[in-house]
Amino acid sequence: MRTALRILIPIVLAVALALWLMTVPGLVSLRFGAYAVEAPLWLAGLATVLLLLLLALLVRLLVRLRVAGIRRRARRAMRRRDEGDEAIVGALAALAAGDGAGAARLAGRARKKVGETPLTLLVEGHAARAQRNDARAKLAFGRLSEIGPPGAFLGYRGLAALAFETGDKDEAAASGRAALAMRPDAQWARALVFDAAARQGDWRTALTLLPSAPKGSEEGHRRAALLLGAAAEEKDQKAALRMVEEAVELAPDLAPAHAARVALLEAQGQRRRANSALERGIVTAAHPILAALALAPRPGEDEEARSRRVEALASYANGSGEAELMAAQAAFEAKLWQKARSHAARAKEAGLDDRRVFALLSQIAAAENPATEAGRAEAELHLREAAAAPQEPGWWCAACGTRHEAWAPVCSSCGAVASLRWGSAPPPPERTLALPPPVPGL
């Protein structure tokens, strides 16, 4: 009913208007140059209405044609986008299957369908990386890093992976810094920047990137190593001592930390605290560098008094082989042959069987009986045992197996942080830094 009224009412009004105009006298005149057209008022009004209706229909037709064109282009764009998405998913599947060539072909199809987008650049870069085409991969990741976040973050991730795989750690760290500025929570970027800072001796930057860690943990050991590196370059001895004491608390089994603490306390004239620190170090991390500090003569101390002091220190270590060897060395230098033999035997019983023990026993035999055949025979026997025994322990890098003469926070050969371990042979390789894939399959 309402629809009929909406149609009938305008018609009735139009007819009424037309009838009214027919009763109104008057003419409408139009002139075009030499031509003139005259029509009654009602006819001119009717022509005007018809013209307006025709114009409205024409406008409506044009609008419909335009909308139809827009919809057609939108459907075409959606179809191309769907085809591009399908190609991208296919490229990801090819990458997950290890098919670099197939991934590159599908990535090219995706680019033709949807153009150069962050996703197509990402897939192109990893497809080229799978094909070992580093130049093309670097170009794709470089373009991705220039388009702004969040795609730029993935671009820097790709550039970092390429540099890391080719051994260019500095370039990898540069990409890591750029990524870290966008996402401070990116652990892989933090790891790369941390690794570069540690290799370059920028201890403070490395420490800011390494969070606090629990005592005795691997991360605690790494932080302790960095603290020792920073303390060695710190001019303020009090600040250096604070760093070293934190390192001791984080890594109680790290002998260089105890040795650094003892040295700093002695340099500041705190003899009593230095003795207490040395005792703690020998109890928790007996080591030749601590033994050397213990064997250093004190003012006014003769060799027998030093032997008693060192023997007391060794007694606190509960049978540590290194501590017993230290006591044996002190007794030998004091010419206390029986004590020296006894401590050397305890060192062997504790599992210390490298060349140092047998070499010391040989020295003891030669010094105790210098002019007897029995003394020479015993000394030669221990020398043969020393030749057959494992070599003297040293600092070995757990990452690359390089032997070092002295402990250092970073391996000078491979740049690994806190990787040096004490022993007679290289320890099993530790887990090295690796970059996790940014998305599944890549």
Image (cartoon, rainbow, N blue to C red):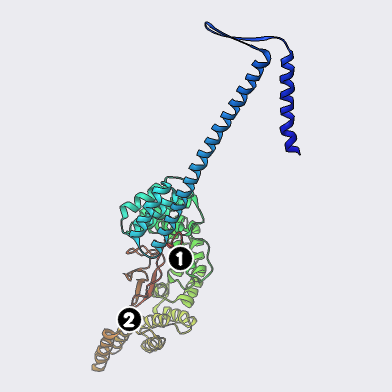
Write down the residue under mark 1.
Answer: 222
* Residue situated in front as seen by the camera: 294 or 46: 46
Helix, strand or loop under label 2: helix
Residue 162 in view here: no
The span from disc 2 to disc 1 (Cα, nearest Å) is: 30 Å
Write down the residue under mark 2.
Answer: 356
* Residue situated in front as seen by the camera: 12 or 244: 12
Q: Quadrant of residue 201?
A: bottom left
Sequence-wise, which precedes: disc 2 or disc 1?
Answer: 1
Check the picture and name the quadrant holding the N terminus.
Answer: top right
Disc sitting over residue 206 in the figure: none
Give the side of residue 150 with respect to residue 40, left or right: left
Residue plotted at (56% across, 33% down): 61
* Above-or-below relation of 194 to 280: above
Horizontal and vertical percent position of residue 439: 46, 60
**Of marks 2 and 1, the one in the foreground:** 1
Q: Quadrant of residue 367?
A: bottom left
